[in-house]
Amino acid sequence: MRIIYLDYNATTPIASEVAEAMKPYLDQYFGNPSSSHSYGIETKTAVEKARKQIADLINCYPDEIVFTSGGTESNNYAIKGIALANKNKGNHIITSKIEHPAVIEVCKYLEKNGFEISYVEVDEFGIVNPKDVDKEVKPSTILISIMHANNETGSIQPIAKIAEIAKKHNIVFHTDAAQSLGKIEADVTKLGVDLLSIAGHKLYAPKGIGALYIKRGIKLEKLMHGADHEQNLRAGTENVLEIVGLGKAAEIAKRDLESNQKHFTLVRDKLHTTLESKLESTKLNGHAKQRLPNTLNISFLNVEANTLLSELKEIAASAGAACHAEQVDVSSVLEAMKVPLEYAMGAIRFSVGRNTSEADIEIAAEQIIKAVQKLSSNTSSPTIDTGEIKLTQFTHGLGCACKIRPQYLERILKDLKPSNHPDILIGNSTSDDAAAYRINDETAIIQTVDFFTPIVDDPYQFGAIAAANAISDIYAMGAKPLFALNIVGFPDKRLPEQVLSQILKGAEDKATEAGISILGGHTVEDPEPKFGMVVTGTCHPDKIWTNSGAKVGDVLILTKAIGTGILSTAMKRGLLNEKQNNDIISSMSELNAKAAEIASKYNIHACTDITGFGLLGHLSELTTASAVSAEIYAEKIQLFDGVLEFATSGIIPGGTKNNLDFVSSKVEFAASIPEVMKLILADAQTSGGLMFSLKEENAKSLLYDLEEASIKAQAIGGISQRKGKDIFVKHV
């Protein structure tokens, strides 16, 4: 199966001419460019040739080009370099709401360090109005940074007009040209910019190489310190091999600019017109004319983008920016453009390249049309072999990681009035796992609801895991489950009914294992499969476990390993080995019944189960409710095999990042706790373990009993007096 590549804005292949130019520098010419002997002279000559090739492309002097590791470093150097070099003059920077994260995140960092950032709005086409930039200018403004062309929509910004404003106020002007270079003219003299960022891998050069144009006379604070390489502007031995590649790529880009533009426009417009002629309710995102010739960002009404991409097995494209492939939320660019939600969720970026043929476009258009029609509401029930179905490809989020961001949820819930009926034992005023209502002096009803999108590919396993996850809330309250009701969202036009049957069967078998019956439920048609339960249980009113009873001196015990969010993301990408796959499925499918039964013999002060808000999120809820603090030890927390390695390589779900952002102000980490461990501790769990808070003298006995029952529980820390933060993460 040949995949049609339509994601050139994410990265480009290395051009054959570029690869050929690089070959001698793999082994033949290996000298250090700083060396004075013949080996060094050879590579130094190659570096300077490349510098001139890039200078020729953007019409500047060669000594105005500094080589970097890529677009991200170039943006960091430009923005931080100006900020730090001019902090005595001012602390105000102007940028836009549609910048690449390599600009936005730098600005956020500077905000935390005393700088003021103004984020300019854009119009419905994603274009900045220069007048809006002018309005934001202050006496303290030291830098304006506006991208040349947007990476998602392709919309081209009025850089020359903004440059006039910058010049009028004597402000340094930077533009990120990573996406535009080689597709449209980027003459720095005509643009009027002082700084311009270049990324090699967008230009048919290798990944890991870039450049920054620094106009003569512009002073930046260095980010890289060491020997005086790159005109004493960036330390580190030059990456000769890839610099040669970038230089050659720049030469080709200049040579073929006009012909490439014609080709890009031809195939892009062919795709657009074909889709528009055959499909109703499409929307072009970005400017129809003032955009990159190779970029088509198009929305399909009420069709979720990631769901559509899962159908396009022979096409490579992006839902929003490729660097946010796991992101659940609507693109910040489309949000800034105020694209309606029903269209924004269905936005796909198709970006063509030099190798895209008209035949490719014809095939791709046909497949896209079929997929969109298949996902529309008036298609007939599908006949798919259930053995070929991978449920995780039909959803934007995985399991409990698809929960609404805790920051957002907190804002929504803060205005709800708590119920005050005398028989309400636990309601919406706390963050407990379930509600509790007193029937009489001997009995309280415990009730919970939980549902989510698939976390595994197998329908039966998904049903079993979702059931175990929902029932767990009852066990976390110290209660006994009685019965359950199913909650179903199902794309009956996309998936055969056998899939739903298997989901329900998995849930039924897990309910039977828990000793309860499923008495009915409710179903709705949904673009994504979703499943969960309402579970009802009972408990003596005086014996309910809550998250508000933790006491100073208590030990915290956790009954399952963590890392299901990270591993399930790796699973979706096909990266898990058989053992890792089996381990997390087994853990998520395991009921917390036995652990709860054993713990019921002890005086449990507080309890919660670890699910979508992660270990730190749920522990923070417990400490807040109990008016205490917690100290936990990173080494004591069990991790599933592979979690640390996958997290280190960046395989982290969006829900996990949201969790860490939410709790970061509530947690104090030891200085030596690495960032990756912070993310793991915030990882969104599905059907995680129970966390008990109990007296130290009872903890060892409970741990022994759990071990005897083959439950690998661990004491992870303890409860202390309230002292500013909710949680203190330490080393043993």
Image: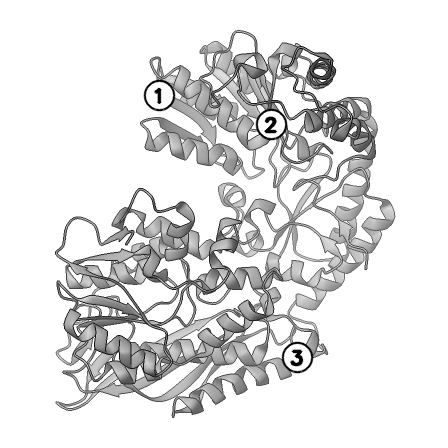
- Outermost residue, top side: 217
**Other-residue count near label 3 (Cα within 10 Å), few / some / many at <14 / 14–19 / ≥20:** some
Tell me the quarter of the picture where residue 188 sits.
top right
Q: What's the distance in space between the residues labelled 3 and 1, CA to CA?
A: 59 Å
Amino acid on which disc 3 is placed: Pro
Q: Quadrant of the C terminus?
A: bottom left
The residue at 33%/72% (across/down) is 713
* Residue 603 image point, x, y percent: 16, 78
Give above or below for 333 relative to 569: above
* Residue 277 image point, x, y percent: 77, 53
Q: Quadrant of the N terminus?
A: bottom right
Using residue 188 as the reference point, say whether residue 529 is left or right of it.
left
Amino acid on which disc 2 is placed: His
The residue at 43%/88% (across/down) is 511
Q: Which mark is residue 91?
A: 1
Element under disc 1: loop
Element under disc 3: loop
